[in-house]
Structure formats: structure tokens, C-alpha cells
Image: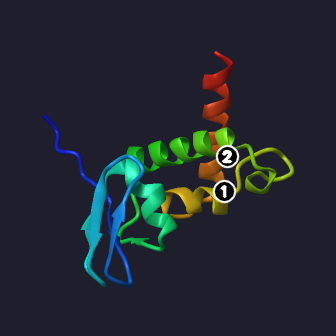
Amino acid sequence: MSEVKLPHFVLNRNHTLISKTGLAVRFEKGVARPVQMILVPEVVGIGAERVEEPQGHEREELIKAAIEDLVERNSSKDFNAGGVPKPVAIKAIVGFQPEADETKKAWLAYQAAKSE
């Protein structure tokens, strides 16, 4: 059984986040904390910064999940003129800014999956 590596975030103040999901995470100023994947958008929303950027498959999955959130939200501010999600909109959800080619690749994969 493989061990799941949770992303770590750091906050510039002491704060306890109590999520709408019922989960909670306590931050101490400047101390990195592991965060459940479901809490990442809320943790980024309070200003926490990711300590390390994800790599490989984990990174792709986070970008895909962010795209699904953006499509569900359906705000024109989150998409460019070509209809592709803006990397900065993805950053607001996952805590890191993907490269434009990563975003386009994930967007094309999302569209292909939805058309099946």
C-alpha cells in the first residue's frame, strides 16, 4: 500500500481553519502543516502558501480538479478569449501557477473526457 503525501502549507499568522466539510487545520505562524487535498482551496483562500510545488501525476490531477471547479463556477473572468482556463485562476484554487502548456494540455484532456 502506497503512502499518500499530503501537500504542506505555511501561513503568516496563527489561525485555525474550520472547513465547511467539518475538517479543521490549525496553523502556527511560519510552521508548515500537511493539509488534506479537499481543504486546499480553502487554505489558499485564507492566504496560506504551498511549501513545495507538486510534481508529475499529482500536479496533473490538481490542475484537472481545478479546471472542473472553474467549469462548474462558470465565470468568464477565469477563461481566456479562446475558452481555455487562465493559469492565474487555477493558481487561486491549487496554490501554484501552472505553465500555459500544462493548462492547455489539461484542458484538452478535460474536453476529451467530457465528449466521451
| Distance between mark 1 and mark 2 Cα atoms | 6 Å
Residue 3 spot, x, y in % from top left: 17, 44
The residue sitting at 56% across, 47% down in the picture is 66
Identity, as a three-letter code, of the amino acid under mark 1: Ala
Identity, as a three-letter code, of the amino acid under mark 2: Lys
The residue sitting at 30% across, 84% down in the picture is 29
Q: What kind of element bears circle 2?
A: helix
Looking at the image, do the residues carrying marks 1 and 2 touch, with CB atoms under 8 Å apart? yes
Viewer-closest of 76 and 13 = 13
Viewer-closest of 27 and 9 = 27
Q: What kind of element bears circle 1?
A: helix
Q: Which residue is mark 2?
A: 104
Is any atom of residue 14 visible in this view? Answer: yes
Which residue lies most toward the left here? 1
* Numbered mark located on residue 78 in the image: none
Q: Which residue is mark 1?
A: 100
Quarter where residue 7 is shown: bottom left
Viewer-closest of 70 and 104 = 70
